[in-house]
Image: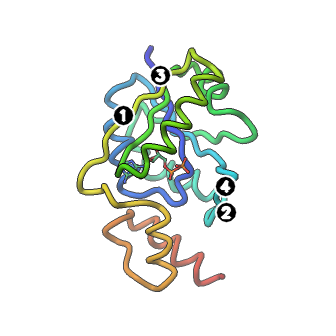
Amino acid sequence: MKKGIYPGSFDPVTYGHIDMIERASKMFDKLYVSITENINKKSFFTLEERLDLLKKICQNYKNVEIVVCQNKLTVDFALELGANVIVRGLRAVTDFEYELQMASTNHQLNSNVETVFMMTNTDYSFLSSSMVKEIAYIGGNVNKFVPKIVEDKIKEKLKKA
Ligand code: ADP
């Protein structure tokens, strides 16, 4: 059984991520979408909120399972799950340096895990979670970028803040 893992912050999940999940799910018998805490980014949504949103959004992808990776290296977590391929997405050239650094580091940490990259769908090449948050903060409409359930949750959260 070929298993892959797609790690990310998903804060929040966007149509860019969903497109990646849909495409990657066709490449593996089982795809784990792993919500990973990124210590360099202060999160908007809690891990539980992101887990709940991703679970709801991905419920129709039968071979996709949403998991949370906390206090663990992605490579170790991947092997624990029996996945030896990490899937990451590349948008503009600006992604390349960070992704190369991460893939090389992961390879040094454990060479049994390979990283593969998928090019962004051109419709979403400029779409990022940070962009969505920035637009939402200033009251802009994010419905082109995230599903309704995510949009509603962002609004709810901003109202409370
Ligand atoms: P991280 O904080 O780990 O970079 P993100 O949630 O921002 O987490 O992104 C997870 C992965 O999804 C990264 O590989 C990123 O490049 C990819 N990704 C994010 N948005 C898009 C998009 N619009 N198109 C393709 N890949 C994307």
Distance from disc 4 to disc 2, alpha carbons, whole Å, reads 7 Å
* Mark closer to the observer (4, 2): 4
- Dot 2 crowding, Cα within 10 Å, few <14, some 14–19, many 20+: few
Q: CA distance from mark 1 to mark 4?
A: 26 Å
The residues tagged by marks 2 and 3 sit, at their Cα atoms, a distance apart of: 30 Å
Mark 3, residue position: 3
Q: What residue appears at the point 62 percent right and 45 percent down from the top-left corner? A: 36
Which residue lies at the image location 64% right of the left edge and 42% below the top edge? 68
Q: Give the residue pinned by disc 2.
A: 42
Residue type pointed to by label 3: Lys
| Residue assigned mark 4 | 40
Mark 2 or 3: in front is 2
Q: Which residue is mark 1?
A: 24
Answer with mark 2 or mark 3, whichever residue precedes in sequence: 3
Q: Is mark 4 within 8 Å of ligand 1?
A: yes
Q: Amino acid at mark 1?
A: Ala
Q: Is residue 66 above or below residue 2?
A: below
